[in-house]
Amino acid sequence: MRWVTVRVRLFAAAREAAGESETAVAAGPLPQVLGAVQERYDERFGRVLEVASVLVDGTHVERGEELHVADGSEVAILPPFSGG
């Protein structure tokens, strides 16, 4: 049996809070995918996730959206950033 997985890429403050730039979780509804990622890391990561933008295969989605994230998809977690 093959695991059905989603690649999750972490950027900026999300990467810093997690201590790594990517992970993999089981495919499924977006809230379940994000919940699985949040469970892997501490509450600092959870605070970053609350304000981050989420992209699924390059398309911006709302965190609570009942979108099914399919096997082989990529989820990107992009915290807000500032700059000039």
Image: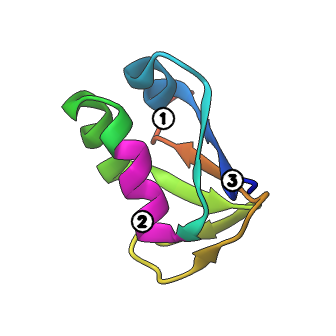
Q: Position of residue 44 (x, y in %)?
A: 24, 29
**Reading the chain from its start, which is encountered first: label 2 or label 3?**
3
Labels 3 and 1 touching (C-beta < 8 A): no
Q: Residues within 10 Å of mark 1 (few under 14, many from 20)?
A: few
Residue 19 is inside the magenta segment? no
Mark 2: which amino acid? Answer: Gln
Q: In this image, 74 relative to 61: left or right?
A: right
Query: Residue at the location (41% across, 68% down)?
Result: 31
Viewer-nearest of discs 2 and 1: 2
Q: Are marks 2 and 3 in contact (CB under 8 Å)?
A: no
Q: Residue at x 25, y 29 (%)?
A: 42
Residue range (magenta): 29-38
Task: Quickly name the residue at label 2.
Answer: 32
Instruction: Assign a secondary structure to mark 3.
Output: loop
The quadrant of the picture occupied by the C terminus is top right
Mark 2 or 3, closer to the camera: 3
Q: Residue furthest front?
A: 1
Tell me the quarter of the picture where residue 59 sits: bottom right
Judge whether 13 appears above or below 78 on screen.
Answer: above
- Disc 3 to disc 1, C-alpha distance: 34 Å
Q: Quadrant of the rendered structure where residue 41 is?
A: top left
- Side (left or right) of 27 relative to 72: left
Q: Marks 2/3: CA distance?
A: 16 Å
Query: Label 1, on which residue?
Result: 81
- Whether residue 33 is in magenta: the answer is yes
Label 2: which secondary element: helix
* Disc 2 from disc 1: Cα separation: 25 Å
Residue 54 to residue 25: above or below = below
Q: Amino acid at mark 3?
A: Trp
Label 3, on which residue? 3
